[in-house]
Image (cartoon, rainbow, N blue to C red):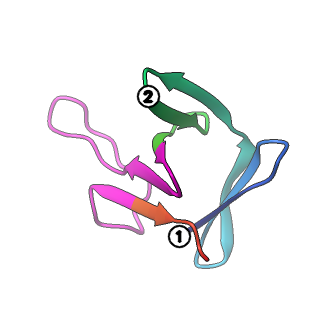
Amino acid sequence: MEISINPQKNYELRINNKIRLKGKIKVYKEDTVTYLDYGHISSMYDRDTIYIQNSGNAMNPYWHFKECDIKYIRLAKMK
């Protein structure tokens, strides 16, 4: 999984080199935490890493990326 975000806040999210999602990202802050909103998916941003909760629980079931079988996805900036 890979995500690219340009200075105009447009993003492309790719899985296996195929574009899965794209659009305009919304950035908002609560206290010292920065959140990124991709429409129906939100994530937390800290320094050079994006954290996405991929699946819910029994009370709130969802699964964003069925290709990934983990609950939390961590995307670190490539150096």
Residue 79 placed where, x, y %?
61, 77
Vertical order, 52 against 24 (above or below): below
Amino acid type, mark 2: Thr
Task: Give, as a single range, the part of the protein colored magenta.
Answer: 45-73
Find out whether residue 27 is within the magenta segment.
no
- 59 vs 41, left or right, is left
- 52 vs 1, left or right, is left
Q: Quadrant of residue 37?
A: top right
Callout 2 secondary element: loop
- Comparing labels 2 and 1, the label whose residue is closer to the camera: 2
Residue 3 placed where, x, y %?
63, 61
Find out whether residue 47 is within the magenta segment.
yes
Q: Sequence order check: which comes first, mark 2 or mark 1?
A: 1
Vertical order, 33 against 10 (above or below): above
Closer to us: 22 or 73: 73
Disc 2 to disc 1, how far (Cα)? 27 Å
Q: Quadrant of residue 40?
A: top right
Residue at 61 percent across and 34 percent down: it is: 39
Callout 1 secondary element: loop
Amino acid type, mark 1: Met
Residue at 50 percent across and 34 percent down: it is: 34
Q: Residue furthest top?
A: 31
In the image, which disc is placed on residue 32?
2
Residue at 31 percent across and 55 percent down: it is: 72
Residue, disc 1:
1
Vertical order, 28 against 41 (above or below): above
